Amino acid sequence: MKSLLTPILTLLLLFTFAQQADARDRRTRVGNTNLCSNEDPQVIVKLATAPTKYIRTKNAYDLTHMHNTGGGVTLGLAGGPVSITVKGQFQSSTLRGHSCVELKRLEVLFWAKPQVHIASNFKKGSCEYREVLAHEQKHIRVLRKFVREQAPKLKREVRKIVKSTRTQYKVRDYKVSEAQKSIEQQIFKRLQVYQNRIMPILHSRQKAIDTPEEYRRVAAQCDNWGRKLASSR
């Protein structure tokens, strides 16, 4: 009965190019600051937590092998992927070999997909099944609460990152891709730092559930652990 967490940070990028070729356009005059717009990027931060997925495909032996931390038999696992997904939209305005590359929109999705594994040794509805499920649900509640707590903090962090990141570059047209990559990497790296900072909080809370006292309490609730575990191999 352990926590199984998979932190993920992914970057999904959409590219929009607005090619400007009219020297009379006030936004695209070469050598003038108006080549770039004066607009700040639109920043959107969303939260999504999927319904809990219950998995019964592995017995206790398989779960122990899958997530062995050096002691005891694993009767269940709870957790699942926790992800920050980043979607960026860019615009490139170009005239006579000069371009302005701008981040126009940044959408950040903070999501979790809770999962619970319960050893297939325990028939649904049995005492053992109910006790393992009740324990794993504690982990899921901690996960969901963590995501809710962190969502507004992430929103503030994303806005702070964008505000302090250079999101416009004036470059020669053959350096458009290079400029985009520079913007992407700055934001992505800083979000990685943020994610690495918050995930230990979740791990610590999950670890606090799996105490010897909790394991003894669960074990004392049912009488047939040994017999049912013996059927796992």
Image (cartoon, rainbow, N blue to C red):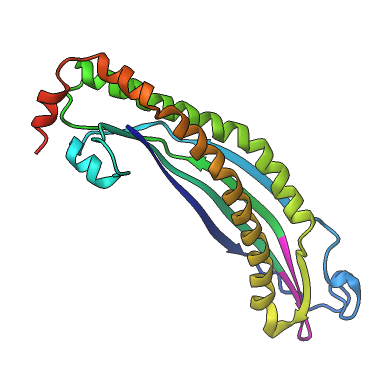
Query: Where's residue 191, x and y in %?
Result: 63, 54
Left of 84 or right of it: where is 38?
Answer: right
Observer-nearest of 219 and 113: 219
Within the magenta stretch, is there residue 174? no
Question: Which quadrant does the N terminus fall into?
Answer: top left
Within the magenta stretch, is there residue 94? yes
**Residue at horizontal 29 percent and vertical 44 percent from the top:** 68
Left of 121 or right of it: where is 143?
Answer: right
Question: Which quadrant does the C terminus fall into?
Answer: top left
Q: Main secondary structure of the magenta part?
A: strand
**Residue at horizontal 24 percent and vertical 41 percent from the top:** 64
Task: Please determine whether, in this image, residue 186 is positioned above or below residue 220.
Answer: below
Left of 81 or right of it: where is 227?
Answer: left
Observer-nearest of 90 and 165: 165
**Residue at horizontal 72 percent and vertical 82 percent from the top:** 173
Task: Please determine whether, in this image, residue 188 is positioned above or below residue 4.
Answer: below
Query: Where's residue 125, x and y in %?
Result: 21, 17
Quarter of the figure with residue 163: bottom right
- Provide the residue span drawn in magenta: 92-103
Camera sees residue 233: yes
Task: Please determine whether, in this image, residue 4 is positioned above or below residue 43.
Answer: above
Query: Where's residue 213, x and y in %?
Result: 37, 21
Camera sees residue 143: no
Query: Where's residue 39, x and y in %?
Result: 82, 57
Quarter of the figure with residue 181: bottom right
**Residue at horizontal 47 percent and vertical 26 percent from the top:** 141
